[in-house]
Image (cartoon, grey):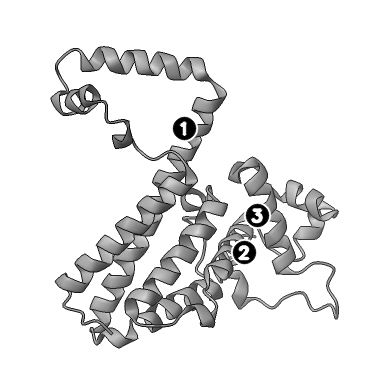
């Protein structure tokens, strides 16, 4: 006989009633994150997590119902790290959003698979704490609720897009370092395309010999680009939304 699916998030369910359960949800999430960081998100399976914990696969079902619960726990564990300690949230709205943006980027860069793999995760308690922290950071702007939500969303979108770009750039850099012949072939092809006359802007930069015009490919350069972009974004938001300096 079919039963109705339980749609409640895992946090709405009571944890195992044992006085001292063998595993906690935090330990399960940490094991799943270690696997994803080492071998990618697709490597996260119930069997692999159980092996990481030294347990039988069926044992996990005493603590979680399915893979969706695991994904929710993973996202919430990441968002726990995103939270900025209270001592780090000082100053006005710019300082607060900057601290949150930097912290978020650092955590996402440490889990480069997370932005594209946890989209279906159920919203958990640390997600609410992160949003509450962001709202607290912009509380002094005197903006209405909708405008504050938009301000936070614009910065969040910038951070997410920057991380995706940075992860791709670093991956390309590692691939280039591992295979110089591939780089040489790509450069030869690019030069031939420039000589076709179809790319006047790129050809002018190449002819001028300005090699600094290329995209950043190191962590330091990418971080510096992030900081410049974040400052410019906040400058623009302050003017467009008429937020006074606090």
The spot of residue 136 in percent (x, y) is 40, 83
Tell whether 117 sits left or right of 23: left
Element at label 3: helix
Instruction: Name the residue located 37 percent from the left edge and 63 percent from the top edge.
Output: 156
Mark found first going from the N terminus, 3 or 1: 3
Q: Give the quarter of the figure containing the N terminus.
A: bottom right
Tell whether 42 sits left or right of 143: right
Residue annotated with mark 1: 172
Instruction: Name the residue located 21 percent from the left edge and 22 percent from the top edge.
Output: 207
Q: Which mark is residue 164?
A: none
Instruction: Please determine whether, in this image, residue 207 is positioned above or below residue 133.
Output: above
User: Does residue 44 appear anywhere in the picture?
Assistant: no
| Crowding near the residue tagged with mark 2, few <14, some 14–19, many ≥20 C-alpha atoms within 10 Å | many
The residues tagged by marks 2 and 3 sit, at their Cα atoms, a distance apart of 10 Å
User: Does residue 116 appear anywhere in the picture?
Assistant: yes
Element at label 1: helix
Residue 92 found in image quarter:
bottom left
Q: Give the quarter of the figure containing the C terminus.
A: bottom left
Mark found first going from the N terminus, 2 or 1: 2
Q: Which mark is residue 73?
A: 2
Q: Are marks 3 and 1 in contact (CB under 8 Å)?
A: no
The residues tagged by marks 3 and 1 sit, at their Cα atoms, a distance apart of 24 Å
Mark 2 or mark 3, which is nearer to you? 3
Mark found first going from the N terminus, 2 or 3: 3
Instruction: Please determine whether, in this image, residue 144 is positioned above or below residue 61.
Output: below
The spot of residue 157 in percent (x, y) is 34, 59
Instruction: Please determine whether, in this image, residue 158 is positioned above or below residue 183.
Output: below
Residue annotated with mark 3: 33
């Amino acid at each position: 006989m079919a039963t109705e699916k339980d749609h409640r998030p895992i946090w709405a369910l009571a944890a195992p009633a044992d006085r001292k359960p063998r595993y906690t949800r935090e330990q399960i999430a940490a094991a799943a994150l270690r696997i994803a960081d080492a071998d990618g998100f697709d490597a996260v399976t119930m069997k692999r997590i159980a092996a990481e914990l030294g347990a039988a696969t069926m044992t996990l079902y005493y603590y979680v119902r399915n893979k969706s619960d695991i994904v929710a726990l993973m996202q919430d564990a990441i968002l726990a790290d995103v939270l900025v300690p209270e001592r780090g949230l000082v100053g006005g709205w710019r300082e607060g959003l900057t601290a949150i943006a930097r912290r978020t980027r650092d955590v996402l860069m440490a889990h480069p698979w997370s932005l594209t793999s946890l989209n279906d995760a159920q919203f958990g308690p640390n997600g609410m704490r992160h949003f509450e922290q962001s709202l607290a950071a912009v509380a002094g702007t005197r903006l209405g609720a909708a405008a504050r939500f938009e301000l936070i969303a614009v910065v969040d979108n910038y951070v997410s897009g920057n991380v995706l770009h940075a992860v791709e750039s670093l991956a390309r850099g590692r691939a280039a370092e591992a295979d110089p012949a591939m780089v040489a072939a790509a450069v030869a092809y690019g030069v031939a395309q420039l000589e076709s006359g179809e790319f006047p802007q790129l050809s002018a930069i190449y002819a001028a010999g300005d090699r600094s015009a290329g995209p950043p490919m190191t962590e330091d350069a990418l971080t510096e680009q992030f900081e410049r972009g974040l400052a410019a974004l906040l400058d623009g938001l302050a003017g467009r939304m008429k937020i006074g300096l606090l």
